[in-house]
Image (cartoon, grey):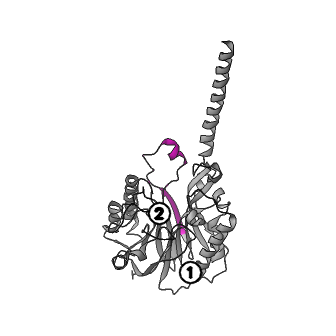
Amino acid sequence: MRSIKIALLSLLIILGIALLFLVFFFFWASSGSLPADRLSEIKVYSNSLFPRPLQSKSSFKVMTYNIGYLSGMLNNQLAKADIAFFQDNARKFEHMLRKIQPDFIGFQEIDYGSYRSYFHNQLDQIAMHSGYRYAAKAINWDMKYVPFPYWPPSVHFRKIISGQAVLSRYPIGMARRIELQPVQHKPFYYRAFYLDRLVQMVRIEINGRQLLIMNIHLEAYEKETREKQANEVLKIYRSVRDRYPVLLIGDFNCVPPQASQKSGFVDEPDMDFEGRNIISLFLQEESLKEAFLDPEFNLSETKTFTFPSDEPSRKLDYIFYDHRKISCIKVEVLKLDSSDHRPVLMEFSFRPD
């Protein structure tokens, strides 16, 4: 009898220690490593790769790109590529930038020092290799250890510092990081390790004029939360639209309302990318237009597809613009496999004041 009690007590002690370890690991792993004042920063690089922008330019190029931390089609997969794979993806993207020279780029899912991408600061790397002097970063995922993908542990993301960014060839006067509605219908442990969804607000000074870029990354897995976030974004847009020309760009994680297919995709059969109640909110905004939806979308829907990058089957990435102050000259989806998304490029000009 005494030996049974000792065995039970030993078992309880072991279970108690295991529970304490799990509690400690949970709070340690889900905590961030950066202070609040470093979650949003403006950076200036000493960069002479390209000459300074011309004062007399009449048109400009803006790109939106969910860069998927340069992981190509391995993003969120049960695999981890070697460092050469990431370097090759970076080189391909930087080569494209040097060729087409966008004036402004809005990134989503860009890493600033994460285990999964070999602790490279991808924003600094791209800026310096591609000739950009100005950048704004916004952190939306800062964790000491992320146990995802769940199994095996060898593919865990581990330490994550990731987020959004805007690169610019023109000076950045202001950058703000605004958190959106978090997910509601997930377990507490899921929410504890999940990224923040953001609006990154960046004001750029262009030859005496100002441009406001709203760089967003909406929720992917909860349609209800995504719709709430879209309404938050629109509320912010309405608060600034009369003061600045606005570009509203990013990964909206939903398809257009007139898309021929909205769910049941081969690569993600259980995901619903329904965007009727979300993209329609932006399309119904009187001052906004989307670069592709009129008239290019109706002429050739497949040319607008941005995801997945190897065999695109849907449009998730958008460039909206205030057509009262901005004119769209040309728009295209660029073929590139450095991420699981493809970048969207729009050439535009300012309307006269």
- What residue span does the magenta drawing correspond to? 173-197
Q: Label 1 amino acid?
A: Gln
Of residue 242 and residue 128, the one placed in the foreground of this image is 128
Q: Residues within 10 Å of mark 2 (few under 14, many from 20)?
A: many
Q: Residue furthest top?
A: 1
Q: CA distance from mark 2 to mark 1?
A: 22 Å
Q: To which residue does mark 1 refer?
A: 101
Q: Position of residue 185 (x, y in %)?
A: 42, 46
Mark sitting earlier along the chain (2/1): 1
Left or right for 148, reference 278: right
Q: To which residue does mark 2 refer?
A: 216
Q: Residue at x 36, y 67 (%)?
A: 256
Q: Residues within 10 Å of mark 1 (few under 14, many from 20)?
A: many
Q: Label 2 amino acid?
A: Ile
Secondary structure under the numbered disc 2 in the rendered image: strand
> In the rendering, which numbered label is found on residue 11?
none
Which quarter of the rendering shows the N terminus? top right
Left or right for 78, reference 265: right
Left or right for 96, reference 225: right
Q: Position of residue 102 (x, y in %)?
A: 54, 78
